[in-house]
Structures are given as structure tokens and as C-alpha cells.
């Protein structure tokens, strides 16, 4: 079970308003109590902070705002003492424009570092070398006055893309990985890793491709060669985990990245679900049958020799409960538990983003000045200030889609600034911290926190929840998500009701529930011998099922005399 920490927003130990490494060390017992095995730490490297650390200035230094290398070593040792492992973020598609490699590279066309980045002449008659858009808005090219050439940046202009065709660049990356593995980290979450191989000749995108540029960016000709090189040189010798951020990867290409026989990545973080309700910065409607169809496809995507990751939130997405459930005070906790149930009962390594174990919600942003994110600011500059999109329209969508929703400080307790800091926090604390905070939830056995804790513990006890075959037993139902996990003679049924209207659900022929394993406190769940189950709002329940499970997820119905168990609370 992996817990993602966005260090800037986790806990501020030294009172400067910014989360830091000693702050994480101070909270490890909280994570241990939740049942966390692995922490994925967002970028902790020295950075000018244009993209909150996704612009690295020095891969071998700790960002001073987060502490020192000794703080890092102490954090790692404290994690190991508790039997937890640390995965660090590896941001090597690009560096900061303040990295010394880039300073050298831009200094002259003859610099030995020139070829560390991607430089091209502009088009005859002016303009950038091709029509690539930056994924943050505007062109992906920046004209650099010193040498009169343009450099490529898939993200902000302050994040120039490295040239992975240059073997020296690849060797530098391997060195950086060894540096952190030698310290004892367990592996890496690899930022936009599919984007590192660039298209041969960098031809213009077609109008069709321009609608989804990341799909082209993620299908460079040498991507698999590069990943195998990393596996061979460094991941395999250290037995390190490699979690690839799959932005841009087509689902059908998943096995190319994660099939163990190919020797590339351990798993990909699939983005199809967290992007289903949006088109770039625009919010768009989604339906439960579409969500369910995605889960089925994702479950099958890695193939027999691959493995998956499961998540509904991260630092680039709005809050899961606001996005996929109901963040109104009435249903927030219950529906957040329902989402946690979904994430933690997949045949995949589950990832929880900090605060999702509390059901933290989107922030009520009103004005552009309240945002911090370079993406929001770039959109404002390239869309609103150029008159292409009315201000009100962008703001209405950002209120649903902005990355800053996930970046407001962790809500630890009911004291000022939610106990995150004694100073002014770098980004506003959500006003609901008096009700939604860790201290209150740890003290309340019925909280989202304890539901997550119980789910994690149950998952560890029941191999069927980890390895069992996944089957959606009612893909078309508009409001019920019903699926089984089956392994040898064990079968678990997961029932989740989306929405706040109760519903009588009739189980498909042949399925019989025997014992309630866990539910989200929706109400008193009785195990019906008959096939009808009365679902209450946002109910999410795990049942042990009767019948014989088959390898493909199918169930043979129980014999009529099979006993039905009593409900378990
Ligand atoms: O968040 C996005 C759009 O809102 C994505 O396009 C996002 O930029 C993409 O998922 C890549 O994300 C990763 O690399 C970025 C960084 O800003 C993100 O925080 C990181 O997760 C550039 O390093
Ligand atoms: Ca601090």
C-alpha cells in the first residue's frame, strides 16, 4: 500500500509555512497506524520551485526549504525502523533551466553540454521549429537570445527537456538513480517517463494529434530501449521498484511497459480514470458505466505478466471525493469511504494521496490570485490574457479541475492553520479543517481514516483482494458498481452505490452473499439469504460469497444447502 506525500503540504516542522522532511519524520507513526507500507515522496531535490520541485536544479541536493541531506537520511532511517520503504520521485524528462547542465548548454552552440537539451533553429521566416504545444499551454519552444535557437519544453519554459538521444544524458540519469539507491531508497516514481524519447525529426503534429499531444509525446521510437537500459543498468541490480507515470500512454500499450518478461517498469499509474471527467483544464461530465468500463479495461491492460496501480487522487488532480463522489457535508465522509473501498479492492498496488484517507475536499477558489500552480497561471496568461477564453469560463473550470485543490495543506487538527504550520501556510488551508482533520478522525472509530485502516488491514489478510480475478458483474447498471474478486475457493463481492438515493439491488442469478466483511457504516447491513440487498446512500460493502471461484473470475453458484453466515461488524 503506497501513500503519496506532497512534501510542501504535508507538515511544517520548522515554522516557515512550508512542509518539510522533518515534518514527515514527525508523522510516520500516523502513517504506520494507517497501514502504509511504502511512501512515495514528491520531488525533494534542490529546485527554484517554478513547478514545486518538478523543476530540478540539482539531483544530489535536498531542497533547502525541505531541510538537509541529514534530514533526508533521518527520515529514511526512521521509515526503515518502522518497516516502511521510501520511493522517491525521479524527474528526468526535463530539468530546471537553472540546472548547471542547462546554464552550460545555453551558453554557446559549441558547449559540451549543448546536446544535453534539444535545440533547433526557428522556421524560415520566424516562429518556433514546429507546432508542438506545451502541456501547460502555449508553445513547447522557447527562443533563447544567447544563441538565437529555440529549446524544447513539454512543460513550463523553465523546464527544458533533456535530450535522451545523447548517451551522456542517459548515463547521468543512471548515476543519479544509483546515488539515491545507495542511500537505501526502494525505487522511483518516474515522472512523465514515457515522454523521454522524442519523435524522429520532430515533425508538426496533425490537427488530430494536436487534440492529444501527449499521446504523440509518449510514443517516441526509443522509449522501450531507454527503459530497458535503466532496468539493466540500475533497477535490476538494486532490485528497485519502477513506477511509471503513464500520462500519454495508450492503454493497449501497457504491456509494452510492464510485462515482466520485457524488463522495463514494475507498473504504470493509469491516468484514464482521473482524466475521464476532463478535457485538459475543462471539466466534462462522466457516467458510472463509463467509469466501470475503464476499470475493466485497466484490470486487463497489463496482461498476464504485468501488474497495475490503482488510484483516484494525486497532486495533479482535484480531490477524489469532490471529483467522483459527493463532498457535501452530509455525504462527504461516507462517499469518501466508498471511493477508498474502490481503490483498495482492485487487483493492483493501491495508492492513497495524502488527505484522501481523511476525505479532504476541493478548495473553494474564487480568483486567479488564489492559485499557486504554474499550470493555472500559464493557462490564464495564454488563454485569458490573450482574449481566447473569457476569465469566468476558465475560473469556473479551474474550480473543478485545478491541481491546487490537492495541494492545500494537510489538515492535522482543529488548531489555527489546521495544525499544519505555526506560520502563514504557503497555500491556504481549506476552511473545513475544523470538521475534517486527522486528530478528530483518529479519535473516531467511524471515520474515513479508520475505514481506510480497516480496508488496508483486510487487504493484507486476504490474498483474494490482492491477486484475485476481477469481474464487473453488472457493467450497465447506472448507479451500482458491483464486482467480484475470486481466487481458488474464495470469492469477495464488492457493492458500491453511487449517489444519495437508496436502492434495492438484486444480485445476479447464482451469486449468494455469505458474510459481510466490511462496510462503510452506511447502515445495519443484514446478509440476505435472498438475492435482494437494500443499499443505502453511498453504501460500500465487501461480502464473502458462496460458490466456487474460477480462474477467469466466474463463479459456480453454491449448492442450495450451503450455510449463510451471520453479519460481522
Ligand atoms: O496535471 C496535468 C494537467 O493538469 C498533467 O498534464 C501533468 O502535467 C502530467 O500528468 C505530468 O505530470 C507530472 O509532470 C509535470 C508536473 O507538473 C506534475 O506535477 C507531474 O506529476 C512536469 O514535471
Ligand atoms: Ca518548513
Image: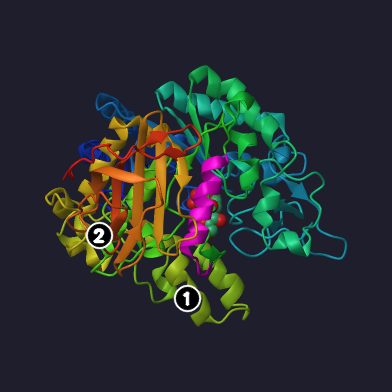
Q: Is residue 511 magenta?
A: no
Secondary structure predominantly adopted by residues drawn in magenta: helix
Please name the residue shown 39% across and 76% down the image: 366
In the rendered image of this protein, does residue 226 appear above or below residue 253? above
Camera-nearest label, 2 or 1: 2
Q: CA distance from mark 2 to mark 1?
A: 27 Å
- Say which residue label 2 marks: 333
Q: Quadrant of the C terminus?
A: top left
Horizontal arrangement in the rendering, residue 382 relative to residue 177 (left or right): right
| Residue 321 visible at all | yes
Secondary structure under the numbered disc 2 in the rendered image: helix
Residue 91 screen position, x and y as percent: 53, 41
Question: Does label 2 or label 1 sit earlier along the sequence?
Answer: 2
- Say which residue label 1 marks: 395
Q: Going by the picture, which residue comes out furthest to the top?
A: 237
Tell me which corner region of the image, top left, top right, bottom left or bottom right, holds residue 399. bottom left
Please name the residue shown 30% across and 54% down the image: 540
Residues packed near mark 1 inside 10 Å, few (<14), some (14 to 19) or many (20 plus): many
The circle on residue 184 is: none
What residue range appears in magenta? 282-301
Please name the residue shown 58% across and 35% down the image: 303
Amino acid at each position: 500500500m503506497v501513500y503519496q506525500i506532497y512534501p510542501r503540504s504535508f507538515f511544517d516542522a520548522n515554522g516557515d509555512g512550508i512542509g518539510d522532511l522533518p515534518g514527515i519524520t514527525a508523522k510516520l507513526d500516523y502513517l504506520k497506524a494507517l497501514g502504509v507500507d511504502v511512501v512515495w515522496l514528491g520531488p525533494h531535490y534542490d529546485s527554484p520551485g517554478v513547478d514545486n520541485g518538478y523543476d530540478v536544479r540539482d539531483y544530489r541536493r535536498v531542497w533547502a526549504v525541505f531541510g538537509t541531506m541529514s534530514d533526508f537520511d533521518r527520515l529514511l532511517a526512521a521509515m526503515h525502523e518502522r518497516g516502511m520503504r521510501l520511493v522517491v520521485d525521479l524527474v528526468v524528462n526535463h530539468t530546471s533551466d537553472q540546472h548547471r547542465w542547462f546554464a552550460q548548454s545555453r551558453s554557446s552552440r559549441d558547449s559540451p553540454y549543448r546536446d544535453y537539451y534539444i535545440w533547433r533553429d526557428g522556421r524560415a521566416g520566424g516562429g518556433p521549429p514546429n507546432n508542438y504545444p506545451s502541456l501547460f499551454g502555449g508553445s513547447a519552444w522557447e527562443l533563447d537570445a544567447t544563441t538565437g535557437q529555440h529549446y524544447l519544453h513539454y512543460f513550463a519554459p523553465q523546464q527544458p527537456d533533456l535530450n535522451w538521444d545523447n548517451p551522456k544524458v542517459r548515463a547521468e540519469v543512471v548515476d543519479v538513480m544509483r546515488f539515491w539507491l545507495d542511500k537505501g531508497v526502494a525505487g522511483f516514481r518516474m515522472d512523465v517517463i514515457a515522454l523521454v524519447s522524442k519523435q524522429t525529426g520532430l515533425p508538426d503534429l496533425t490537427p488530430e494529434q494536436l487534440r492529444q499531444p501527449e499521446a504523440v509525446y509518449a510514443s517516441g521510437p526509443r522509449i522501450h530501449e531507454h527503459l530497458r537500459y535503466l532496468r539493466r543498468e540500475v533497477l535490476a541490480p538494486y532490485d528497485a521498484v519502477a513506477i511509471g507515470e503513464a500520462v500519454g500512454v495508450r492503454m493497449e500499450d501497457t504491456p509494452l511497459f510492464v510485462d515482466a518478461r520485457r524488463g522495463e517498469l514494475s507498473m504504470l499509474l493509469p491516468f484514464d480514470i482521473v482524466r475521464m471527467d476532463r478535457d485538459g483544464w475543462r471539466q466534462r461530465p462522466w457516467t458510472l458505466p463509463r467509469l466501470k468500463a475503464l476499470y475493466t479495461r485497466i484490470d486487463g491492460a497489463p496482461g498476464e505478466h504485468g501488474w497495475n496501480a490503482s488510484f483516484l487522487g494525486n497532486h495533479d488532480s482535484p480531490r477524489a471525493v469532490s471529483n467522483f463522489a459527493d463532498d457535501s457535508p452530509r455525504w462527504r465522509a461516507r462517499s469518501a469511504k466508498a471511493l477508498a473501498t474502490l481503490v483498495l479492492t482492485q487487483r493492483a498496488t493501491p495508492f492513497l494521496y495524502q488527505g484522501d484517507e481523511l476525505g479532504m475536499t476541493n478548495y473553494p477558489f474564487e480568483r486567479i490570485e488564489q492559485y499557486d500552480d504554474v499550470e493555472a497561471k500559464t493557462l490564464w496568461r495564454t488563454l485569458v490574457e490573450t482574449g481566447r477564453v473569457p476569465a469566468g469560463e476558465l475560473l469556473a473550470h479551474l474550480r473543478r479541475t485545478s491541481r491546487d485543490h490537492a495541494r492545500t495543506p494537510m489538515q492535522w487538527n482543529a488548531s489555527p492553520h489546521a495544525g499544519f504550520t505555526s506560520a502563514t501556510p504557503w497555500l491556504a488551508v481549506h476552511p473545513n479543517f475544523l470538521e475534517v482533520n486527522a486528530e478528530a478522525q483518529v479519535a473516531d472509530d467511524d471515520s474515513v481514516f479508520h475505514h481506510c485502516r480497516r480496508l488496508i488491514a483486510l487487504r493484507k489478510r486476504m490474498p483474494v483482494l490482492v491477486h484475485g480475478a476481477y469481474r464487473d458483474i453488472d457493467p450497465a447498471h447506472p448507479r451500482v458498481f458491483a464486482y467480484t474478486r475470486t481466487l481458488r475457493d474464495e470469492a469477495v463481492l464488492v457493492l458500491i452505490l453511487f449517489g444519495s438515493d437508496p436502492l434495492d439491488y438484486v444480485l445476479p442469478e447464482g451469486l449468494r452473499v455469505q458474510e459481510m466483511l466490511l462496510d462503510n457504516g452506511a447502515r445495519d447491513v443484514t446478509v440476505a439469504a435472498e438475492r435482494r440487498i437494500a443499499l443505502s446512500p453511498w453504501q460500500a460493502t465487501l461480502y464473502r460469497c458462496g460458490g466456487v471461484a474460477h480462474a477467469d473470475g466466474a463463479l459456480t453458484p453454491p449448492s442450495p444447502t450451503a450455510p449463510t453466515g451471520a453479519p460481522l461488524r
